[in-house]
Amino acid sequence: MLSCVGLGKQFGDRIAVDDVSFAIADGECYGLLGPNGAGKTTTISMVCGLLAPDRGTASIDGAPAGSLRAKAAVGYVPQDLALYPDLSATENLHFFGQLYGVTGRRLASRIGEVLELVGLAERADERVGTYSGGMKRRANIAAGLIHQPRLLILDEPTVGVDPQSRNAILETVGSLGISVLYTTHYMEEAAKLCRRVGIIDDGRLIAEGTPHHLIEAHGGQDRVRLSCETAGRTALAEACRRLSGVAEVRSIEGGLELVCDHGAAVLPTVVSAASHEHVALSGVEVMAPDLEGVFLALTGKELRD
Amino acid sequence: MVITCIVAPLALAGILGFAFAEGDSPSHVTIGVAGARADLVRAAEHAAQLPRSVSVRIEANRSALKEAVADGSLDGGVVLSARPIALNHLLIPIIAPGATPSPGFDVMSATSSLAGQQWSESMAAALSSRLYAGRLVAGSATDRAAISVESATLGNASKGILNYFAPSIAVIFLFVGAGLGMRSLLLERSSGTLVRMAAAPLKPNRIVFGKLLAIFITGIVSILVVWGATTFFFGADWGDPLGVLLMCIGATAAMCGLGVFLTSWAKDEQSAFGVALIVGLVLALLGGNLLPPGALPHFLQVAALGTPNGWAQVGFGRLSLLSEPASAIINPFLILMAIAVVTGGLAMTRVNKMVEP
């Protein structure tokens, strides 16, 4: 559906996107995961034909990105709300639908469908300016879906949205069944929605694969966090280091962090060691590796930096 | 859209009409004449085509008239010199009403009464016209010319100020309107809707052309509303309708082209608003839109022809003040269209950059 080969874009001396290549199959949800300023928006701007790439090519369903055929196949949902606040959701969808050549009964029918899909049917005739932040985001997505695109491109659609609206947005996107390019810096969203994820940092795609594959390859080991008092903490750390299956013991705020292959398996021996050292544990947490860990392992920095 | 096309032009027409269309004003104006025989005054009064709201009173002498104007019982007046007036001096108030000094004529008016001044000048012109005609051999070609000058000058006098200022101010309104139209485009850019349009399967120049066309249509509707409202509600006469229509099209195209081009350099909608107002005011001053005809110094009159509103003034002035036919405005119209093509083309290039990848 979408193929990007060696995409590159430079603004002055700053390289925003450098040799980015990836492809999205029909019906696949692909996540572009990276921190703010990593090059996600620049990449999708080139895919949508809003920016001309300096290097490389992008094609949508065989048509060059930016061509009228490619644009007609894409539904673009920008990061910021891109609707007329003085118009109702219906009026906004009417206008943007017509831009894509959807008219008459088909347009009226599509407006009803997409508003139902995003859960705004009951407030369809109210001014968008009166909507809550989450409702505006959902209306923004509806405008990207009005012409039944084959590829939906969402640029960080959940930034600044309350948890309830975020869940609603994720459910909507997950139910579409069309190709989706989803950019985010929330790793849990990418892990939940996307079949494959590309990790982008400083304009370069540094890893790509299914979340499971990425975690397995780059996510490292389980971490066990122990909350305990300061007294006896040093002795407990020494005891844990001697335990089989524990690779590393770090001192963290409020306790210790153990790095091990199977956190759940070592937990009984850790609790036993704490009892032996007369250290009272106030909390124990086993954390499996995730995409956050993948990003940390690949770049040496946190995803939200 | 409704505000820009209908409400604001109607408000503008209303302000202009109530400010300048004193011929329809219910308030009565009385002007005095001193130093002229009663039969000459009556003949001049008839020639001046004074409306019913204006009456003429004969005063005994200059000091009586001056006193009556000073105490407010007269809105204005004309004193004829007791000395003989040279024939060529008689032409001055006929050809250039309001010109001072007019040898042999002393026009005075209350400072608060624009109507008093206007009708006093009309009476001065009519008196001088009758005197001029009376000194020529009856039936001569020169006599007919003098009478012709008289009727041409006085026939338009009743609405002269409104006829001149209505198109004059409306043209500046066009520029500000175009700037505000461009502001809406910048607003679309900052709000993200322009990006959404650019992502749609439309050629960028179609988006730009649509935007400019909307600005032009808004402009042409607004000036036509001012024309219609000042004509129907306040009795203004902008001149030959075909000529006025052509001038409206030319002025709108030129002012919108220039307005969009200049405001397209603004960084955001706030600065576009500032640019539209400031440049609009400068153009109005430079083009002479805020001053009576011929009031600008000579070098500024030449400079006015470097502005589209200056050329609009020329065209509208020929139609309304000189009652010339539509054929008389071909040159101003063509110049305005040339300005429109150049500035509109540059504006399209600028706006295209906002939309093109």
Image (tube, coloured by chain):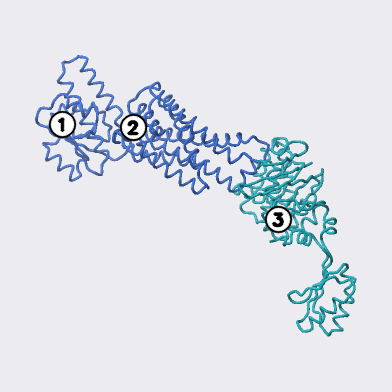
Chain colours: A cyan, B blue
Q: Earlier in the sequence, mark 2 or mark 1?
A: 1
Horizontal side of B115 relative to B5 (left or right) equals left
The Cα–Cα distance between marks 1 and 3, rounded to whole angstroms, is: 83 Å
* Amino acid, disc 2: Val
Q: Quadrant of the C terminus of chain B?
A: top right
Q: Subunit of mark 2? A: B
**Pick the front one: A12 or A225:** A12
Residue lying farthest to the front in this orientation? A13
Q: Is B198 situated above or below B80?
A: below
Quickly name the residue at label 2: B302
**x and y percent of residue B12 in the render?**
41, 40
Q: Quadrant of residue A49?
A: top right
* Amino acid, disc 3: Thr
Q: Subunit of mark 3? A: A
Q: Which mark is residue A158?
A: 3
The Cα–Cα distance between marks 2 and 1, rounded to whole angstroms, is: 29 Å
Quickly name the residue at label 1: B103
**x and y percent of residue A56 in the render?**
72, 41
State whether discs 1 and 3 lie on one chain.
no
Residue occupying image coordinates x 69% and y 43%: A46
